[in-house]
Amino acid sequence: MVTKFYQHILALAFAVKEINENPTILPNITLGFHIYDSYHDARMTYRSTLDLLFKSQRFVPNYKCDTQKNLMAIVGGLSSDTSFHIRDNIDLYKIPQLTYGSFPMEEESDEIHVSSFYRMVPNEAHQYMGIISLLKHFGWIWVGIFVVDDESGANFLQTMEPLLSKNGICSAFTQRLPKLARFDNLDDVYGVLFRGYKDVKDDKAQTFIIYGESMALIWLTAIFLVQDNKNNDISSVTKVWIITSQIDFMLTGLQRSWPLVLFQGAVCFTIHTKELLGFHQFLQSIKTDGIKGNGFLKDFWEQAFDCDFSNPNVPMDTSEQCTGEERLESLPDPLFEMGMTGHSYSIYNAVHVVAHALHDIYLTRSKPRAMMGHNIFELHDLRPWQLHPFLHGISFNNSAGETLSFTTKKEIGGGFDTMNMVIFPNKSFLRVKVGEVDDTAPEGKKFIIHEDMIMWHPGFNQVMPISVCNEHCPPGHQKKRKEGEKFCCYDCAPCPEGKISDQNDMDDCFRCPEDQYPNKMKSQCIFKTLSFLSYKEPFGIGLASIALSFSLLTTLVLGTFVKHKDTAIVKANNQALTYTLLVSLLLCFLSSLLFLGRPGKVTCILRQPAFGMIFSMAVSCMLAKTITVVVAFMATKPGSSMRKWVGQRLTYSVVVSCSFIQSIVCTLWLMTSPPFPDVDMHAVTTEIIVQCNEGSVTLFYCVLGYMGLLAVASFIVAFLARRLPDSFNEAKFITFSMLLFCSVWLSFVPTYLSTKGKYMVVVEIISILASSAGILGCIFAPKCYIIVLRPKLNNREHLIRRTH
């Protein structure tokens, strides 16, 4: 028996003493208790349970041979196996059993709900949730597991391993520790732990879960002391130990010199506890007076202080003699804790639960009997099974101010405290509360951890430990599973083109939203910039300047022709047609400005149809000029019938009819599927192209095609008329202009289709300006030269001069 167990007994004694001294609870009635050890063995547990039921040393199953011992309830045991073995016997008598240790999760213990089983601790499912939350909080996905080799350990693995897998956590290994009670099992334990020693020392896992009983810590310490005996320094074993609530930090008398530094910085889940008023003073008040007559206290004292009380009948060995001056507070914490542990607190509450249930029965049944003149109800007449209705409805505040009541599943509510173990060189330790687990708390507060309060093992240099199978995959990469390995072990592969990962260890890369694109590292999405041909950028400024310059130049040419309208060269070239052509060219230059700036609804509707109509009129004027020259020459021949076509009517007919056809196409386009503002998210990776969607692409190319048809017709007619006499030879200038016009627009189509974004607009503006400038230069530059620089040549004699 180890000294930690004695604190549980002293908590029980303190609770009984507190109740017996309280005049408001069970007046004139004294509670007592008997202590039985389960020996960690099913057979001995059954034997001890039968001893509870029968006072005599000889026991007869299913027969109660005296009534002096009035057993009302049983508190225990610590492990679920022990509790279940006790239950197997006492359920026959429906004696309430209040357990203060672990028990299986709810779904695995339905049979318990219909038995005489009451749990003084929260459901273990809350602890499992706390372990998973802790591992996920720190990113520990590669953990080793030590479990005691019994039914509770098997239940733990059966429940925990699926939870780990579900939450993306893998077990590096699982070691089953034999269920220990005596030191003669050392060889078996050594054989088991030796196989796990290399895993613990060399494995990538830095975090280990220990589930079982308190002896597991002793044997884990022993194996490291044995294996590291060369340097005799187990402090070099730098690990994080996650210890479940069933385990107390303790050492027996033989191990009182062993260091506990191996578990420095361990994170423990403990049953919620509060300090009880008077408990510390109760422990200090324990004196050696009367110990010799109290076997329990005598054994406790001798084991705790490693001494013997003198006995005249037994010769003294070499052990130190107990003086009676020893004090419990002088014992190191692994041997005896002066504070109230979670298990001791549960035992204390269990005693008070039974006492309050008995008190409720006493009040309920004594009052009617007194009113009827009968004797006061005696609790000696009570049977254990009669406590159950009162236990179900129990509700009271203990001396620490906490409300105790059972849920419908016969559990005490609440949760677990998360404690950090700080171990000192003198083998004392301090439990520092760093968090809590409470499944009844609001969402987001079920698991609380104060990371900055945790003191890690010195080997970590106060840097948060990392427990993973391999290095994290950084942003810009995705996990790639290794064949034959657990899913926590993986390689890292770069994200495919067009995808990113912005966190560590992402299973799959993902695409950015449409308005964003990946950076070079493929670790972040960057917002795309809006792209359109702005007036503020160099291209926009340059093209706008060119367009305005040519517009001004065209205006000057038009002004020159108007000013010299009475001269021979102006009259000879059909004034009305010339003015119409110049106005059309002016509008052509200005129409290019519609393509600059952010496309809007109005500009999108206007720019292509306006461009098509204006250019068609300009080319129609060129065609009309060519036809006029040809008809005029043919009309000079004797007897020609073409004379009736000479005049303004032919010119106007050609211009109006050709322009009218284009207007019909543009009108049909605007009525059926007009252009509209649109954005292209995908053409350019880093940009959102703000553009005009042409609506009907077919009608758009019909407009361009018809304009090209007019240009080709003008070119052909002008080419055929190029050898006419010099006085009428404007056709060769039209030929050059149409050749330039056709060349520009033939190169426009493939260039336009091969560019994207605002550069498509640039290509179209350049084509408009180049073709318009070509017509302006080829047709009007020679005339302006004569009008402005050679006015002597601007007369009728020079114009009608014939070549010989």
Image (cartoon, rainbow, N blue to C red):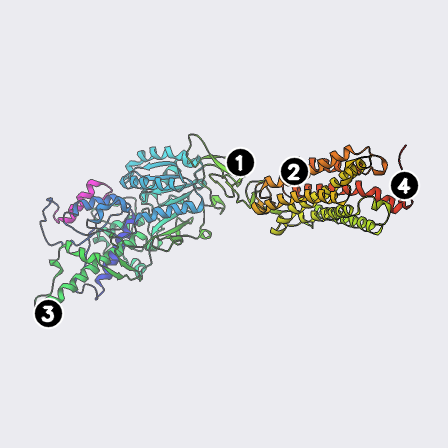
Residues rendered magenta in the picture:
38-56
Find residue 705 and name its label: 2
Q: Secondary structure at mark 2?
A: helix
Q: Which residue is mark 3?
A: 371
Q: In screen coordinates, is 101 left or right of 519?
A: left
Q: Which numbered disc flags the more N-terminal residue, 3 or 4?
A: 3
Give the number of the mark in front: 3 or 2. 2
Q: Which numbered disc flags the more N-terminal residue, 1 or 3?
A: 3
Quadrant in which residue 349 is drawn? bottom left
Q: In screen coordinates, is 575 left or right of 457?
A: right
Direction left: furthest residue? 373
Q: Secondary structure at mark 1?
A: loop
Q: Which residue is mark 4?
A: 798
Label 1 Cα crowd, 10 Å radius (few <14 / some 14-19 / many 20+): some
Q: Mark 4 to mark 1: distance in Å? A: 76 Å
Find residue 676 and name its label: none
Cβ–Cβ below 8 Å for labels 2 and 1? no
Q: Is residue 688 visible?
A: no
The question of residue 535 being in magenta is answered with no
Q: Secondary structure at mark 4?
A: helix
Give the number of the mark in front: 2 or 4. 4
Q: Is residue 235 visible?
A: yes
Chief SS of the magenta region: helix
Q: Mark 2 to mark 1: distance in Å? A: 43 Å
Q: Nearer the viewer, residue 618 or 224?
A: 618
Give the number of the mark in front: 4 or 1. 4
Q: Amino acid at mark 3?
A: Met
What percent of the width, then of the height, locates residue 658?
A: 68, 42
Q: Which residue is mark 1?
A: 496
Label 3 Cα crowd, 10 Å radius (few <14 / some 14-19 / many 20+): few
Q: In screen coordinates, is 474 left or right of 755?
A: left
What percent of the width, then of the height, locates residue 565?
A: 83, 50
